[in-house]
């Protein structure tokens, strides 16, 4: 994109599109604040779990596994077992 093709002056956007852009940015900012609050809440729960003796790394792995489709997860586990078996690790 050349400088001639992109004019950064505020006149490029109509008042309607500028208003829409402002709305989108404000929504994204609120969502980002929500995301930060959720991350802080999760950090607190992980700290609580760690304080009760749970392994946080394993909890994160359990969450990741539970998000996966069961059939896909079973297929991945079968391939992993096959590879480990081929290497004499099982």
Image (spheres, rainbow, N blue to C red):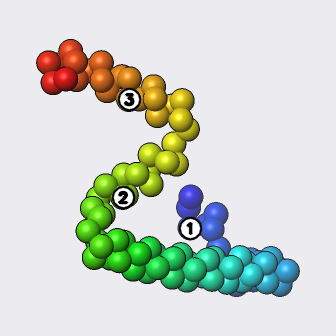
Q: Quadrant of residue 17?
A: bottom right
Give the residue at mark 2.
59
Q: Position of residue 19 (x, y in %)?
A: 79, 83
- State the residue in front, 69 or 26: 69
Q: Is residue 52 left or right of residue 16?
A: left
Residue visible at 14% across and 18% down in the picture? 88
* Mark sitting earlier along the chain (1/3): 1
Q: Of all residues shown, which one is farthest toward the right?
A: 16
Vertical order, 70 against 14 (above or below): above
Residue 3, labelled with which disc? 1
The crowd level at tag 2 (other Cα within 10 Å; few <14, some 14-19, many 20+) is some
Horizontal and vertical percent for residue 73?
Answer: 46, 34
Q: Quadrant of residue 34?
A: bottom right
**Mark 1 touches mark 3? (CB < 8 Å):** no
Mark 1: few/some/many CA within 10 Å (<14, 14-19, 20+): few
Quadrant of the image occupied by residue 51: bottom left
**Camera-side residue: 58 or 34?**
58
- Please give the name of the residue rendered at 85% of the width and 80% of the height, measured from the top-left corner: 16
Q: Residue 77 bears which disc, if any?
A: 3
Q: CA distance from mark 2 to mark 1?
A: 50 Å
């Amino acid at each position: 994109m050349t400088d001639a093709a992109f004019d950064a002056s505020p006149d490029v956007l109509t008042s309607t599109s500028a208003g829409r852009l402002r709305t989108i940015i404000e929504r994204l900012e609120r969502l980002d604040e929500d995301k930060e609050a959720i991350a802080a809440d999760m950090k607190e729960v992980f700290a609580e779990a760690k304080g009760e003796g749970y392994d946080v790394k394993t909890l994160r792995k359990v969450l990741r596994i539970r998000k996966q489709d069961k059939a896909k997860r079973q297929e991945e586990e079968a391939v992993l077992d096959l590879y480990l078996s081929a290497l004499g690790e099982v």
